[in-house]
Image (cartoon, grey):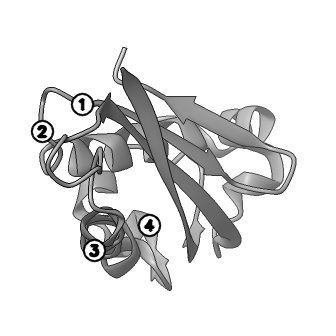
Amino acid sequence: MKVTVSRKAHFNAAHRLYRPDWAEERNDAVFGKCNNPNFHGHNYDLIVSVTGDIDPDTGYVIDIKVLKDIIKEEVEDAFDHKNLNLDVPEFADLNPTAENIVVVIWNKIRKRIANTMALEVVLYETPRNFVTYKGE
């Protein structure tokens, strides 16, 4: 029997969407106001879901405190109140779109979750705009 356990989290971060190898006109055409050279910010919301079997000894799929600590260490401590382009090494050469951010987060958390469990990350850039990654 598979059960999914989810934990919500939040972080604030700034970023700029652009490609340094493109002319400014092309960056403006593709990324619009998100190409602001002075950056812009979002209040990101995150839902991390782990699916697996219930441990007969503990009754847990995963201890929610353990999941909370993983999210804090891998995401909140690394991204909160940071400029993703300048302060987060994973984005030194990777455009910090919502799609790329969710994959980076998934990879950081995946290494801390048992391979017997499925992992899904949903990242809200705004209340209406969100992306989902399941490692596929």
Q: In which quarter of the image is residue 21?
A: top left
Q: In which quarter of the image is residue 107?
A: top left
Asked which secondary structure carries label 2, the reply is: loop
Q: Quadrant of the N terminus?
A: top left
Of the two numbered discs 3 and 1 on the same chain, state the one appearing first in sequence: 3
Height in image: 30 above or below 48?
above
What is the C-alpha distance between the residues marked 1 and 2?
6 Å
Residue 3's x, y, as percent?
43, 32
> Residue 133 versus residue 83: which sits nearer the camera?
133
Marks 4 and 1 sit apart, C-alpha to C-alpha, by: 29 Å
Q: In this view, does 77 lie above or below 127?
A: below
Label 1 secondary element: loop
Q: Residue at x 46, y 36 (%)?
A: 4
Q: Which residue is drawn at 42% across and 25% down?
A: 134
Labelled disc at residue 114:
2
> What residue is shown with label 4?
84
Q: State the mark number for residue 69.
A: 3
Query: Circle 1 is placed at which residue position?
Result: 117
**Mark 3 and mark 4: span between their CA atoms?**
21 Å
- The residue that appears at 31% across and 72% down in the rendered structure is 65
Tell me which numbered mark, 2 or 3, is placed earlier along the sequence: 3
Task: Using residue 89 as the reference point, say whether residue 81 is left or right of it.
Answer: right
